[in-house]
């Protein structure tokens, strides 16, 4: 493509320059003939002023003798009769000249095998109207054009080859940063994501591309690093649960136990299976959370019924841990638009989180209220709490606080990340307010409800 464009460019330059040179040479010849006509008129005027009379044969002959290309000079009257030269030899080229010469007219003819430009013009000479014919040989001009054309034909292949070679080296030099970037990109793998593409000094599109790719590699490296750490933590959790289940089952098979001991072993196996199942379920939900928002089915739901069902589902678990789980609702229903299954999961994550990190004889309260800014659900506990620095990060997607070091049951580090995603899907605000060793309060603030819901809520508080 580069060769084709270069060839077309050289060809257009050659054609246009040749045409411009031809036009300039012919225009120069026309100007020359018009100058000869002016000198003829001056010569005739001087001859008549000295007493010469028509037909001015002798003065015209003298003019033809002393003028360059005097043999290409003739005159006719308006009837077409030849006035000069008197000899019939002039008919050969005069007869080929234009007949109508009211305005200056030019024509190309070949006289004696040579290209000739003939000018014809009707003028008044010594009170008589005549047609003057002046001819000029174009041999020199055509010779110049021929030499220029031959030079173009000889130079064009060389120029084409030179431009091709120069274009190749220039393109190689210009694309050298791209080659370096390509080689570096091909060497980057999962084991060396810290490598970056070289950024050229030139402030052009290639530099912008290199910077953009380096930013992308930085984000990919961070994501892979978090995923690697997260996978290692999850693998440890799953391996721990499987090890406990396997050890408990093997011990039960190799030793005789009482019914109470077998029940204790089975309870331990069930607990570990539930832990592993919850972990895998959390992993699946978290993996789908980036695209699952498109499948959220919003509909009108009653938050009061949702809170009651969510609390009753985990009431037995709280009781088995020696905890009191209670809920507080307004007198009338509170409606919002949302996905009931996801909101049940959100509430379950918060209550389960409170159960895990609240010591025995503690209390968990779930409160539903309505304010002008919307519906609010608060899950409070009297558990171990969270320090302020952890509160700022506890909702991060792959963050796990050092809860495993505590004496209470540790979580998988996924629940609150999923809870934040569900809240974001409902355009709700999920926040936490916690004090170490005093408890935590997770608050879900839903956006302003529909006009119908707000009306019902206003009536509710007016009646109260």
Image (tube, grey):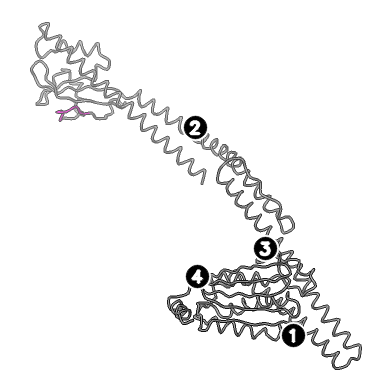
Q: Position of residue 203 (x, y in %)?
A: 57, 41
Q: Which residues are magenta?
A: 100-105
Q: Indicate the secondary structure of the residue bearing disc 2.
A: helix
Q: Which mark is residue 373?
A: 4
Q: Indicate the secondary structure of the residue bearing disc 1.
A: helix
Residue at x 80% of width, y 78% of height? 242
Q: Position of residue 425 (x, y in %)?
A: 55, 71
Residue assigned mark 1: 320
Of 280 and 303, nearer the camera is 303
Of 402 and 329, nearer the camera is 329
Magenta stretch: residue 101 in it?
A: yes
Of 219 and 453, nearer the camera is 453
Q: CA distance from mark 3 to mark 4?
A: 26 Å
Residue at x 68% of width, y 73% of height? 283
Q: Which mark is residue 389?
A: none
Q: CA distance from mark 4 to mark 1?
A: 37 Å
Q: Position of residue 199 (x, y in %)?
A: 63, 45
Residue assigned mark 2: 155
Residue assigned mark 3: 393
Residue at x 74% of width, y 85% of height? 320
Q: Indicate the secondary structure of the residue bearing disc 3.
A: loop
Q: Position of residue 332 (x, y in %)?
A: 50, 84
Picture quadrant of residue 415: bottom right
Q: Is residue 228 above or below residue 200?
A: below
């Amino acid at each position: 493509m580069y060769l084709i464009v270069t060839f077309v460019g050289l060809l257009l330059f050659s054609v246009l320059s040749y045409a411009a040179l031809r036009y300039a040479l012919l225009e120069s010849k026309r100007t020359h003939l018009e100058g000869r006509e002016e000198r003829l008129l001056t010569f005739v005027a001087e001859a008549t002023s000295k007493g010469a009379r028509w037909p001015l044969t002798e003065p015209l002959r003298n003019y033809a003798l002393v003028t360059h290309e005097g043999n290409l000079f003739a005159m006719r009257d308006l009837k077409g009769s030849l006035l000069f030269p008197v000899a019939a030899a002039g008919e050969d080229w005069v007869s080929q000249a234009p007949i109508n010469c009211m305005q200056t007219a030019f024509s190309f003819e070949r006289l004696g095998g040579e290209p000739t430009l003939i000018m014809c013009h009707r003028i008044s000479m010594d009170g008589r109207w005549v047609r003057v014919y002046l001819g000029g040989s174009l041999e020199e001009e055509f010779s110049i054009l021929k030499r220029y054309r031959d030079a173009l034909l000889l130079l064009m292949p060389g120029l084409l080859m030179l431009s091709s070679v120069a274009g190749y080296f220039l393109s190689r030099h210009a694309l050298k940063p791209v080659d370096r970037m390509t080689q570096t990109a091909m060497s980057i793998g999962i084991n060396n994501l810290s490598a970056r593409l070289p950024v050229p000094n030139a402030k052009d599109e290639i530099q912008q591309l290199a910077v953009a790719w380096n930013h992308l590699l930085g984000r990919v490296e961070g994501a892979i690093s978090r995923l690697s750490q997260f996978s290692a933590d999850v693998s440890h959790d799953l391996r721990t649960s499987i090890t406990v289940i396997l050890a408990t089952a093997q011990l039960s098979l190799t030793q005789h136990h009482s019914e109470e001991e077998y029940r204790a072993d089975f309870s331990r196996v069930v607990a570990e299976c539930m832990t592993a199942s919850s972990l895998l379920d959390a992993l699946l939900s978290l993996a789908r959370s980036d695209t699952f928002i498109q499948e959220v089915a919003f509909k009108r739901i009653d938050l009061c019924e949702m809170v009651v069902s969510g609390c009753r589902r985990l009431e037995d678990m709280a009781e088995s841990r020696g905890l009191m789980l209670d809920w507080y609702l307004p007198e009338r229903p509170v409606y919002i638009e949302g996905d009931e299954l996801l909101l049940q999961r959100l509430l379950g994550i918060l209550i389960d989180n409170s159960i895990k990190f609240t010591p025995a004889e503690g209390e968990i309260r779930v409160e539903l209220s309505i304010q002008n800014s919307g519906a609010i659900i608060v899950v409070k506990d009297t558990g171990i709490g969270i320090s302020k620095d952890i509160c700022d990060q506890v909702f991060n997607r792959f963050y796990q606080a050092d809860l495993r070091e505590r004496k209470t049951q540790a979580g998988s580090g996924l629940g609150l990340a999923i809870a934040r995603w569900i809240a974001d899907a409902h355009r709700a605000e999920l926040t936490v307010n916690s004090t170490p060793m005093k408890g935590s309060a997770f608050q879900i603030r839903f956006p302003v409800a529909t006009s119908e819901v707000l009306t019902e809520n206003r009536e509710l508080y007016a009646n109260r």
